[in-house]
Image (cartoon, rainbow, N blue to C red):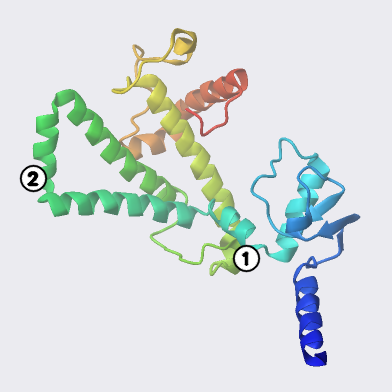
Amino acid sequence: MRIEQIKREMRRLRRTVERQPRVWRFRGRRVVHAEDWKYGDYSTFPDEYNILVKSKTAPADWYRDYLALMEKLEDPLYGRLVCSNCTIRQAQDVKKEIDRHQKYWQDQGGESAREQFYEEAGEIHAKYFRKLDAMRQVQWRVFNELAGAKGRTCDVHNHFRCPHRSERNQLLEVGYDAWRLWRHVEWFDDHWNRSLTYTPVASEMKWYHFDESSIIDGTDFEDLDRAIDDGRLDRIVQEHLRYMKETDREIWAL
């Protein structure tokens, strides 16, 4: 009986230890086990990253310290989310999508099968599909050439285990800027070129410029590169920023 009692005590002790936070206090606040943290309790910190916690609802100082705690703990989920901004990671993801489409058409019979499908789809749809194909290539070049991924790949997907440690912060910063640049390009394409699948409602039409001259060619990397230098992209960015401010939409929301 005593042996069974000791085993029960050992199991209880192990559960108690497992439920202890990895640190007890951080920047003046108590740290609690993630399962014990109550959403909205800004007097404490959870000891794991909670994807439901948003910067817009949490107090600014609490959220800043919370992310600093996740850095200190090298939380794996937080590390993965931070890593998603890396230019190498983003270039790799776009290249996978390009390769996926390429493999599909190879399985269907190659380039001739794709061209036959486009011809059968009709001129309007063929033009649309070709535009999507070309824009994927431009998007990949934005991350690979403009933002410096340079054909590199990575399967770590954790900021704290980054194999490019000496330049990981730069890869994140440039990757984030490249991501924003491409969101502006996508917004431009959506608001200057008519869609085959939807028509904007009347209240939104002030943001659409279907009958105006195009500003950049989203299917041409060289033209996009020139637009960055000659100021054409600035016009799109300013219009997009005004759109986000007046409609209260995020940069990724078309």
Question: Which dot marks residue 112?
Answer: 2
Decide if residue 193 is in sight here: yes
24 relative to 159 in the view: left or right: right
Q: Is residue 229 visible?
A: no
Label located before the other in sequence (1 or 2) = 2
Where residue 62 is drawn, which disc sits there? Answer: none
Look at label 2 and name its amino acid. Answer: Ser
- x and y, in percent, of residue 245 in the image: 62, 22
Which residue is the site of mark 1? 160
Q: Is residue 185 left or right of residue 24?
A: left
Looking at this view, is 203 or 179 the one in front?
A: 203
Position of the N terminus by quadrant: bottom right
Q: Residue at x 41, y 21 (%)?
A: 191
Say what secondary structure mark 1 lies in: helix
Q: Please state the horizontal and vertical placement of residue 2, each as a whole percent of the image.
A: 83, 91
Residue shown at the point (77%, 48%) measured from the top left: 64
Q: Is residue 134 left or right of residue 47?
A: left
Indicate the amino acid at tag 1: Phe
